[in-house]
Amino acid sequence: LGDAELLRYSRHILLPEIGIEGQRRLLASHALVVGAGGLGSPALMFLASAGVGCITLVDGDTVEVSNLQRQLAHSEAQLGRTKVASAAQTLNGLNSQVKLRALALRAEGEKLQALVQEADVVLDCTDNFASRQAINRACVAARKPLVSAAAVGFDGQLSVFDVNDAASPCYACVFPADAAFEDTACATMGVFAPLVGVVGSAQAAEALKLLCGIGSHLRGRLWMLDARRMHAEHLLLSRDGACPVCASQRENPAG
Ligand SMILES: [Zn+2]
């Protein structure tokens, strides 16, 4: 690390759990963040400020006035621009050393698979069930750790799904694709502004720890936060041996 980097990241380097080696790992890492809204804003900002070397951000939406209540990467001056262009400008202002790839599209299909393949860690900051399932399938196929979060109303959830760990379920083990989950979108249900800050920041924390090799307490656990009482609990998650997404992948380990 050069002098400028030693100074910029000194408060991380001082942590024995991270140190110079951990910071080197962050600088050499590539994170894929799908969704640049309420969760994606703080997640992206902490990944960039912490010096994750390359960040790919993907979102097909544009900045609307109703986003500004909680989506901190965007500002009034960015209304009408794509969220990825707006967020990229914010992130570049935080840390111009980070290599940013901003893609104004809805991540799906082969494109999504290719993006996941290139990343060291994937953050699901989307707000709908179909995207979550698609991102999980891509992560299982590419054997990439997935930091998956959700926030609606006053309720937040966060977990890490990593099929490289034999005991860890995938997202679909816990939330099967054929289950009749209703999308509880912020647009209809509302969302408490700081909730996405808390959960999106925790999502960045899990991703940074994975990249540094510190591990993750949330592998195989679901962290559930009720911001009304500011009460959190952990649910132990287990694998579904018949999971249509990950069971066959585990039997035939690829590379
Ligand atoms: Zn599974």
Image (tube, rainbow, N blue to C red):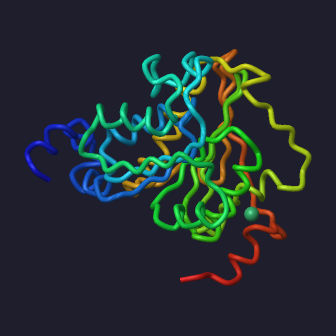
Which image quadrant shows ligand 1? bottom right
Relative to 91, is 236 on the left or the right? right
Query: Which residue is situated farthest in the front direction here?
Result: 80
Q: Is residue 45 above or below residue 1?
A: above
Q: Is residue 12 above or below residue 66?
A: below
Image coords of residue 106 (percent x, y):
62, 49
Residue closer to the observer: 141 or 247: 141
Image coords of residue 71 (percent x, y):
53, 25
Residue 37 in which image quadrant? top right
Image coords of residue 23 (percent x, y):
27, 51
Relative to 124, is 248 on the left or the right? right
Image coords of residue 122 (percent x, y):
53, 54
Relative to 196, is 214 on the left or the right? left
Please report the residue visible at 36 percent of the width from the left and 57 percent of the height from the top: 29
Residue closer to the observer: 91 or 215: 91
Please report the residue visible at 60 percent of the width from the left and 37 percent of the height from the top: 61
Please report the residue visible at 69 percent of the width from the left and 59 percent of the height from the top: 170
The total number of labels drawn is 0
Residue closer to the observer: 192 or 73: 73
Relative to 171, is 181 on the left or the right? right
